[in-house]
Image: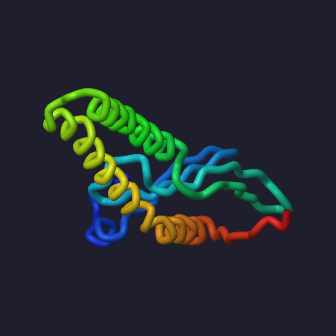
Amino acid sequence: MDRSWTQKEKNKGRVFGQGTENKIFLKIEHWGQRDDSAYSLEGKMFEERGGTTIEAKIGRGKKATFFVVFWFGFLSIFIAIGLGVTFLGDVPWMFSAMFIIMPLFMMAIGGWLFGRSAKRGPEDERRILNFLEDKVKAREVRSLG
């Protein structure tokens, strides 16, 4: 596979993935994005009525959700320590800045980055489904149950 990016792919991202006879995994990758918060399709394939049925979930991966919970939880510990020591003890303002303001700043940056990728979510889902439709003539069928 050619690893160079076309200008169109740099602007919109590209879909790639892998699969076996029973499993499928597709993910959209964006130029310059090196995290796991991109949307993906992960599922199973099986034969049905002379064709192949794909049962899959599409959305953000479990790793991305875990990372966000870990990120905000870890930084919250520093904020709690900073607030506790600031209100219960006589500490210099620089200590408060280091243990309260810096983690808040890091939370804001993390929230902005995660939110930026969330805005692309519906577009990424559409691109993954269009890729499936284009490459294997797949069409979306909603479950009745």
Between 1 and 40, the one nearer to me in the picture: 40
Q: Position of residue 110 (x, y in %)?
A: 33, 50
Image quarter hosting the C terminus: bottom right
State whether residue 16 appears in this view. Answer: yes
State whether residue 3 appears in this view. Answer: no
Q: Position of residue 101 (x, y in %)?
A: 24, 45
Q: Is residue 127 above or below residue 62?
A: below
137 to the left or right of 31: right
Q: Residue at x 52, y 53 (%)?
A: 60
Q: Position of residue 69 (x, y in %)?
A: 47, 42
Q: Is residue 138 above or below residue 56?
A: below
Between 64 and 21, the one nearer to me in the picture: 64
Q: Residue at x 39, y 40 (%)?
A: 71
Q: Position of residue 96 (x, y in %)?
A: 21, 37
Q: Residue at x 44, y 45 (%)?
A: 68
Q: Is residue 99 above or below residue 43?
A: above
